[in-house]
Amino acid sequence: MLWSEVRELFPNQFVLVEELKSHYENHKLHVEEVAVVRPIQDAQQAWKELFAASNGRFVYHTSNEKIIIEVRNKPMLKRLSVHES
């Protein structure tokens, strides 16, 4: 389903969606098509769903005209080993 269609069906609310079609441009993910998993009624529930989401699922608010997500690379973690003398 196109994001514009989701916005019409679920105006001014959070929705849990699954990414179906997208592309990367300038370190940003531009999502073109999604499958709606379910609408979410309040912001507190939206946060819970966002942190529990996986496998291409995420929460987004339909007040946004487009789905554009900035992609950040995780910094490489270094672990110092401590040697006892």
Image (spheres, rainbow, N blue to C red):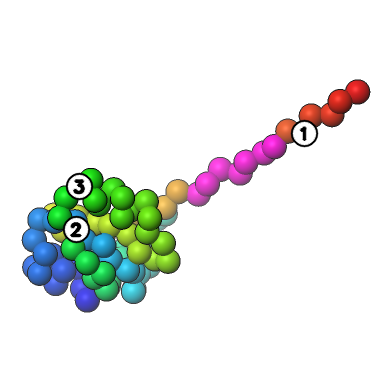
On the image, the x and y values in percent for residue 78 come to 67, 39
Q: Which residue is mark 1?
A: 81
Q: Is the residue under label 1 in contact with that under label 3 (CB below 8 Å)? A: no
Residue type, numbered disc 1: Ser
Rendered-image quadrant of the C terminus: top right
In depth, the one of 71 and 56 nearer the eye is: 56
Q: Is residue 14 left or right of residue 22?
A: left
Q: Which residue is mark 3?
A: 43
Q: Which residues are magenta?
A: 73-79
Q: Residue at x 32, y 59 (%)?
A: 58
Residue that lies at the very extreme toward the right in this rendered image: 85
In depth, the one of 85 and 23 nearer the eye is: 85
Q: Quadrant of residue 77?
A: top right
Per the image, label 2 sits on a secondary structure element best described as: strand
- Residue at mark 3 to residue at mark 1: CA–CA distance: 42 Å
Local crowd at mark 2 within 10 Å, few (<14), some, or many (≥20)? Answer: some
Residue type, numbered disc 2: Ile
Residue 28 visible: no
Q: Which residue is mark 2?
A: 40
Does residue 5 sit above or below 83 in this rendering? below
Residue that lies at the very extreme toward the bottom in this rendered image: 1
Confirm whether the magenta stretch covers residue 75. Answer: yes
Q: Quadrant of residue 23?
A: bottom left
On the image, the x and y values in percent for residue 16 come to 26, 62
